[in-house]
Image (spheres, rainbow, N blue to C red):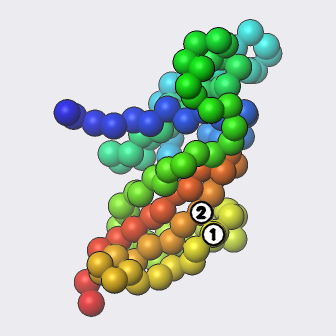
Amino acid sequence: MDSLAPNLFVKDIRSTIEFYKLLGFQQIMSVPGEGEGQLVWAMVSSGKVTFMFQTFESLGDTLPQISRTDGGSLLFYIRIANIRSFFEAIHDKVNVIHGLQKTFYGATEFSITDPNNYVLTFAEDEVG
């Protein structure tokens, strides 16, 4: 296996892309929808982390097993460098659900939700 790129189902791809750009991601590609300026799928990337976003509507009747509600029963754990400066840069622009903390396994972490209620936890193995 070479990589993992989760495909998250969202209501508004454009606002989701803008949120992830705030976190340092860049839009790599997208697929337009039928409406003016509408997108049905997009991909963002930052370093080795990639997310894809797709509208619930674009699923149609395929894959009925996929829940049509916001968020999910999962958490995205993203390792980054300079976690404290990253936290300071974004904490007042995002919904922080758990502030900076040192874990029992030695990582410094914080958690936020994106506009679609997906949980993102950022972590760094700080020395000391």
Quadrant location of the C terminus in the rendered image = bottom left
Q: Which residue is mark 2?
A: 112
Asked if labels 1 and 2 touch by Cβ distance under 8 angstroms, the answer is yes
Relative to 57, 76 lies left or right:
left
* Kind of residue sitting beneath label 2: Ile
Q: Residue at x 63, y 69 (%)?
A: 97
Say which quarter of the image contains residue 12.
top right
The picture places residue 115, in percent across and down from the top left corner, at 69, 49
Relative to 38, 28 lies left or right:
left
Please name whichever residue, 54 or 82, is drawn nearer the observer in this view of the structure: 54
Say which quarter of the image contains residue 91.
bottom right
SS of the residue at dot 2?
Answer: strand
Quadrant location of the N terminus in the rendered image = top left
* Kind of residue sitting beneath label 1: Ile
Spatial separation of the CA atoms under disc 2 and disc 1? 5 Å
Q: Residue at x 57, y 28 (%)?
A: 66
Give the crowd class for mark 2: few <14, some 14-19, many >=20 residues within 10 Å: some
Residue 40 shows up from this direction:
yes
SS of the residue at dot 1?
Answer: strand
The picture places residue 36, in percent across and down from the top left corner, at 79, 15
111 vs 70: above or below: below
Q: Which residue is mark 1?
A: 97
19 vs 87: above or below: above
Please name whichever residue, 67 or 38, is drawn nearer the observer in this view of the structure: 67
Q: Residue at x 50, y 50 (%)?
A: 74
Residue 85 shows up from this direction:
no
